[in-house]
Image (cartoon, helix red, strand yellow):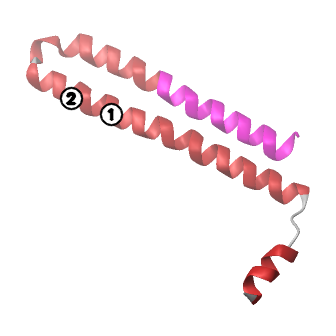
Amino acid sequence: MAALSFLLEVTFSDAAMRFVGAAFVMGLGGLGPAVAIGMLVGKGLEAIGRNPEATPNIQTNMILGIAFAEAIAIYALVVAVMIGFVF
């Protein structure tokens, strides 16, 4: 019970909460694209394995999808930097 009362007395500065928020944004913003890229590559390789003649079309669409998924991670990075240093 003493540890709980200690936690209630702790105060966090605005700067600390900004960096915690930036870390949270970056963590969630990196998790989604990582899962999406893994699924895209896995399904793309599965499709290539089933139909090797369609490799150029599948590969082009897979790379385009990976680029879009990675753009979401870059947006999350921009938001995290803005939270940490601008606001």
Judged by its main secondary structure, the magenta piece is helix
Q: CA distance from mark 1 to mark 2?
A: 10 Å
Q: Residue furthest front?
A: 1
In the displayed structure, does residue 84 sit left or right of residue 80?
A: right
Residue 86 location (% of width, % of height): 87, 39
Q: Is residue 41 above or below residue 84?
A: above
For mark 2, what is the residue?
A: 45
Identify the amino acid type marked 2: Leu
Secondary structure state at the residue bearing disc 1 = helix
Marks 1 & 2, CB-CB < 8 Å contact:
no
Q: Residue at x 58, y 39 (%)?
A: 29
Please determine whether, in this image, residue 81 is positioned above or below residue 53: below
In the displayed structure, would residue 30 be above or below residue 23? above
Image quarter of residue 53: top left
Query: Which residue has dot 1 on it?
Result: 39
Figure quadrant of the N terminus: bottom right
Tell me if residue 67 is in the magenta stretch.
Answer: no
User: Callout 2: few (<14), some (14-19), or many (20+) C-alpha neighbours within 10 Å?
Assistant: some
Q: Which residue is located at x 72 percent, y 35 percent?
A: 79
Q: Is residue 46 left or right of residue 42?
A: left
Type of amino acid under label 1: Met
Q: Is residue 30 above or below residue 11?
A: above
**Magenta part of the protein: which range?**
68-87
Question: Residue 10, percent across and down?
Answer: 85, 74
Q: Nearer the viewer, residue 82 or 3?
A: 3
Residue 85 falls inside the magenta stretch: yes
Name the residue rendered at 74%, 49% in the picture.
Answer: 21
